[in-house]
Amino acid sequence: MSFTNEKILQTALEQSAVDAGCLAEDFLRTENVVVTSVNSPGARKYLTLPFDCNLVSYGNNVVASVSDRCRETVADFIGRFPAQRCFETPTLHVLNDALQRDGLRVCFMAEYFLPDLKLLAPLDCPYSMRLLGPEDFAPLYTPCWSNALCEKRKELDVLGVGAYDGEQLIGLAACSADCDSMWQIGIDVLPPYRRQGVASALTSRLALEILDRGKVPFYCAAWSNIRSVRNAIKSGFRPAWVELTARSALFVEEANRGNSREARGETE
C-alpha cells in the first residue's frame, strides 16, 4: 500500500472512531462531541470497553466516549474549558472530583505519535541491526524488554528490529498488531548503550518495515516521558492525538500499588 501523510492521519482517525464509537470526522469538528461507548471487535485490543469516560483530541475539539452514568458529568466538563485544558491540571481536578461521585478517577493519559513521511528515514546505528519475528521473541519476555514486548499479549507481537553488540542484544524495537490497520511500536535499549542513537535507528527502521507491510505505525508516550518523546521526534514521528481515560477508584489504587496485571498491560 502506498501511504501519504494524509492517508496515515485518516487511518488513525478511522481507528479512533472505532475505539470511541463515533465518526472519523467527529475529531475534526470545532464543537465537542459526546457519544455512548460500546464494545467493538475492531477496537485496539488492549482497550477495556465500553468506557466510562475516555477523552480524545486531535487538536480541534474533544470527543468524549462515555457511559450513560457519566454523560452529563463529562459533557458539562468539556463544555466549560478549551480542548487543550481538558487534558491538564488544574482543570483535571474538576473532572476527577466529579467522577469520584460515581466511584471513578482519572487514570491513563498519553500522547500518540504518527510518522511524518517527510521526515521518516533510515537512521545510522553504531551496532548491527537484525529483523526479528515472533519466533525470535520467546526468550525475550523479560523486564529489560518489557516496553518493546508485552508478555500478556504475546500473540500480538508480530515484528521487531534488534541491535546487537556482537551476539548480545542491546536494543529492541518491536510492534504489536493492536488493530487491523495500525501497529504500535515499543522500544528498549540497555542502559550502557543509551544516548548513541540506537533507539531512533531501531524505531525508524521498524516504522519503515511496518509501512512496507501496509500497516500504519504509531507510538505512544506519557507526556512526562521526555526520553521517549525525544525518541519519537528524532525517529520521524510527530504528535497526532491525546487521550485520557478514567477507571474505577479500585483499579487506580491497585495500579498505584503495582498489583493490577490489567493496569500494567493496558499501558504497555
Image: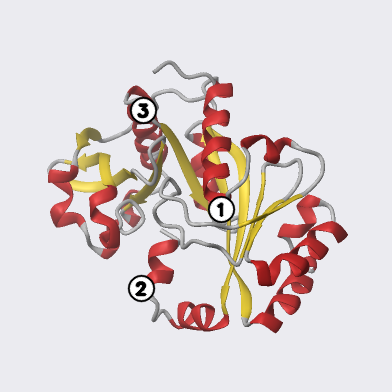
Q: Residue at x 77, y 67 (%)?
A: 72
Q: Which mark is residue 6?
A: none
Residue 124, which numbered label? Answer: 3
Residue receiving disc 1:
226
Position of residue 236 relative to residue 63, above or below, is above
Q: Which quadrant is the C terminus positioned in? A: bottom left
Please say if the residues under marks 1 and 3 sit with CB atoms less than 8 Å apart: no
Kind of residue indicated by mark 3? Asp
Query: Label 1 is placed on what type of residue?
Result: Ile
Question: Does dot 1 land on a helix, a strand or a loop?
Answer: helix
| Residue 150 visible in rendering | yes
When asked about the image quadrant of residue 100, the answer is bottom right
Q: Amino acid at mark 2?
A: Arg
Tag 2 secondary structure: helix
Label located before the other in sequence (1 or 3): 3
Q: Are marks 3 and 2 in contact (CB under 8 Å)?
A: no
Mark 1–mark 2 distance (CA, rounded to whole Å): 25 Å
The secondary element bearing badge 3 is classed as loop
Which of marks 2 and 3 precedes in the sequence? 3
Q: How is the image coloured?
A: secondary structure
Q: Quadrant of the N terminus?
A: top left
Residue named by callout 2: 261
